[in-house]
Image (cartoon, rainbow, N blue to C red):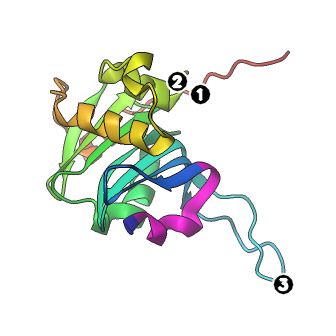
Amino acid sequence: MSLDRYQHLFFNANFKEAATKPGFDAYRGEFILKEGEVADAQGRRGPPAAVLKQASLLSEGDALKMISGSLDELQQFPLLLDVIGADFKAGAIAVLFTINIPKPFVTSLNGGLVVFIPLTEGMAWNELIDLVGLEKGDFKGQSSADKVVTVYNALLSEKFKYPELTVEEAMKTTNNAKRVTHGAV
């Protein structure tokens, strides 16, 4: 299974399980992009230095089919590429909600589609569902993994009408936006 190779990068996992569609596996939780420094003589590490927050991953056999989540800044994208770059191939889709970009854009990577959407507040999973126009009823009776498959299938038919940019071009337009959090005062 393709997701097993990432097991050591799963952090605060919600689930990792097989879907009812044979060969498909899904994961939701945090996804470590850069591990923390070694903190002691026993080799234990400190907290991760960079994380893809609210991540959703889907694989079919050994192929990575979908990855989604929230990046604090576009500058973290190369870290994600270091981790998944070789597995991201034609037919794969990435939707990355990125805090410090002013406008959405798309780019291609190894024949796969990468969509960047600005998001300073909200939950990546909820935004992903809204993006493809799914509703609560579309998930009725499905397992957690099957819900990820449903979102992936909806993404396949989505026509993203965002400008095409390279990540290098987009890096020149980043801003100082920060994640908006709400909570107890």
Q: Earlier in the sequence, mark 2 or mark 3?
A: 3
x 29%, y 68%: residue: 86
Residue annotated with mark 2: 120
Mark number, residue 98: none
The three-letter code of the residue at mark 1 reads Arg
Instruction: Evaluate if marks 2 and 3 touch, with contact meaning CB atoms under 8 Å apart.
Output: no
Circles 3, 1 touching at the beta carbon (< 8 Å): no
What is the distance, in whole Å, between disc 2 and disc 3 at their CAs? 38 Å
Q: Tag 3's secondary structure?
A: loop
Pick whichever, 147 or 131, lies toward us. 147
Pick the front one: 41 or 93: 93
- Residue 163 in which image quadrant: top left
Whether residue 22 is situated above or below residue 147 in the rendered picture: below
* Residue at figure coordinates x 76%, y 19% from the top left: 183
Q: Secondary structure at mark 2?
A: loop
In the rendered structure, the answer to whether residue 153 lies left or right of residue 12 reads: left
Q: Is 13 situated above or below 44?
A: above
- Which circle marks residue 41 in the picture? 3
Q: How many marks?
A: 3
Label 1 belongs to which residue? 179
Q: Is residue 116 above or below residue 83?
A: above
Q: Amino acid at mark 3?
A: Ala
Spatial CA distance of label 3 from label 1 is: 35 Å
Q: Does the CB distance between marks 1 and 2 fall below 8 Å?
A: yes
Percent x, y of residue 154: 25, 31
Residue 174 x %, y %: 40, 33
Depicted 160 relative to depicted 33: above or below: above
Which mark sits nearer the N-terminus, 3 or 1?
A: 3
Distance between the alpha carbons at the discs numbered 1 and 2: 5 Å
